[in-house]
Amino acid sequence: MSSQFPPASDPHQPAEGDLSGRRLGDFHLLRRLGRGAMAEVYLAEQERLKRQVAIKILKPELAGDRTYLQRFELEAQAAASLVHANIVQIYEVGCVDQLHYIAQEYVQGRNLSDYLSRHGPPDLSHALSIIRQVASALAKAAERGVVHRDIKPENIMLTSGGEVKVADFGLARLTREGAANDLTQIGITLGTPLYMSPEQVEGKPLDPRSDIYSFGVTCYQMLAGTPPFTGETALGVAVQHLKSRPQPLESLRPDLPPALCRIVHRMLAKYPSERFDSARVLLRELRRVQIEHFGDDWPEDLPGWESLAAEMPDDPRVAATRRLGELMKSTARMRPGRRRWGWLAAGLVAAFAIGGAAAWWLVVPPSLLADANPALPKVPKEPSVERQCYRASQLGTEAAWQSVLDYYPDKKSYALRAKQQLSLIFLRKEEYARAMAIFDELAALDEDQPELRAFGLAGQCGVLSLRGQCDESDAVLRRLWPIHDRLDNRQMKRLLEYAIERNRSKLGQQTAREWDRWLAEQFREGD
């Protein structure tokens, strides 16, 4: 959870009105994290899932106000629709004892404002990583018609592992829902004047380009060490957003690539039409800076990769794989009935063999399969681990992913991603022992890497089920449940679906229904 709110006055005991120690349904409130204008935020333990969450509770004096309550519910509606690695995830919305709350992902780390006050501007590589990840979050929000309205350093969370997450969609508006458009027009200042877009200052309708402006202000501050506009009053700052030009970033930071300075100033254009049309376009421009300045591209699993990688020149050997993926996407997605599960294990392995599980009965043209995974010589070393990973993602072979481990064994995060890909290759080849060795390693990682742990546990569960070891598989399923929502690999989800069906009698009806509900949501979203 973002730490943008002031801390409680006494961290050692509950202050007046502090709900620490209370229970809200399945949530045990541990301590107050902070307070905002509309809500208080608590660290809580979700007892059934044994995980820590952040609970945002609408202030009681506001819960009786229908307009405030609508805004609070709108926040949940907007944010819950955004499932992305760089967006703080909403888990649950509820009301207990007249307390309206939102349960969301608890992010251990510090916000960008705190980071800048402690360390000053980050180096170029780190800055580009932060900008890319926030832009990816904004791209996802724009796809869902959501405008954040309050992008600022306090709402950008940085984890120790390098992840960046955008928090607090409390001022979000659904641009596709006309009924929501007037809820923020209640005479209350929305957004922070230092980061408001000109159209936001004037109270005009907003679209995602307003977020790009606010993010441009944030980027300027991150790189220059100071916001582009400051003043003694909110009105004074707002007027500057409308009429003043910021000091050229390159004059403050002549060491920065000129292309990056141009990107930031374009984000700060007074008129929306002069900014980037979308965060996707911004990502494309950032990628050019990354390649030109460092000679490296971003690795495959980074958010925003899908739209960017399509623009890169391909190795001829990857063309068949891409055509295969397009063919799979064009096939109708259909989930099998339970009576088919007896023979579906073979279909599962076949699904891995063709590179995905978007369809179970897909008939693939032989010419595609013949070209998709040719025998390759030893993969040459690339000048950086990022380029090694990118080349491996193009080739998609065991040798290619093994080259990441061979050439860059000290790059732990990249090595773990390479092992993920190797485990899928081993499953495809029915080399379960080799796959299981990787799943065991990933499942044993520390709690600060929940995505990789979830991947490893799902793999363990699937292999045990394929081997007929249902008791062991059931035990792993129970370990996976607290972090199951961090599983983001579609092949693992299909493997997990098979494992759950095999273990249905052991799981019990309620647990099985919860798994079924979650998986149905995943596949309904296109996974």
Image (spheres, rainbow, N blue to C red):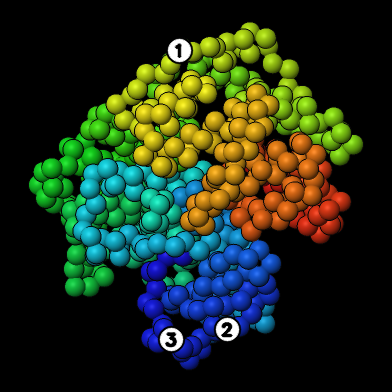
Q: Residue at x 57, y 10 (%)?
A: 371
Residue type at numbered disc 2:
Gly
- Quadrant in the rendering for residue 497: top right
Label 1 secondary element: loop
Q: Tell me where residue 253 appears, x and y as whole percent.
A: 13, 47
Label 3 secondary element: loop
Pointers 3 and 2 in contact (C-beta within 8 Å): no
The mark that comes first in sequence, 3 or 2, is: 3
Q: Of tags 3 and 1, which is closer to the observer?
A: 1
- Placement of 400 over or under 84, stated as above or below: above
Residue 266 visible here: no
Residue type at numbered disc 3:
His
Count neighbours of disc 1 (C-alpha within 10 A) and say few if under 14, some if 14 to 19, many if 20 or more: few
Q: Return the mark for residue 21.
A: 2
Quick check: 404 left or right of 324?
left
Q: CA distance from mark 3 to mark 2?
A: 13 Å
Q: Tell me where residue 261 appears, x and y as whole percent.
A: 20, 42
The mark that comes first in sequence, 2 or 1, is: 2
Q: Which residue is mark 3?
A: 12
Count neighbours of disc 3 (C-alpha within 10 A) and say few if under 14, some if 14 to 19, many if 20 or more: few
Q: Return the mark for residue 396.
A: none
In the image shown, does 49 or 146 lie closer to the viewer?
49
Q: CA distance from mark 3 to mark 1?
A: 62 Å
Q: Residue at x 77, y 24 (%)?
A: 361
Q: Of tags 2 and 1, which is closer to the observer?
A: 1
- Quadrant in the rendering for residue 129: top left
Residue 193 visible here: yes
- Placement of 385 over or under 484, stated as above or below: above
Q: Residue furthest top?
A: 367
Q: CA distance from mark 2 to mark 1?
A: 62 Å
Q: Tell me where residue 202 appears, x and y as whole percent.
A: 33, 60
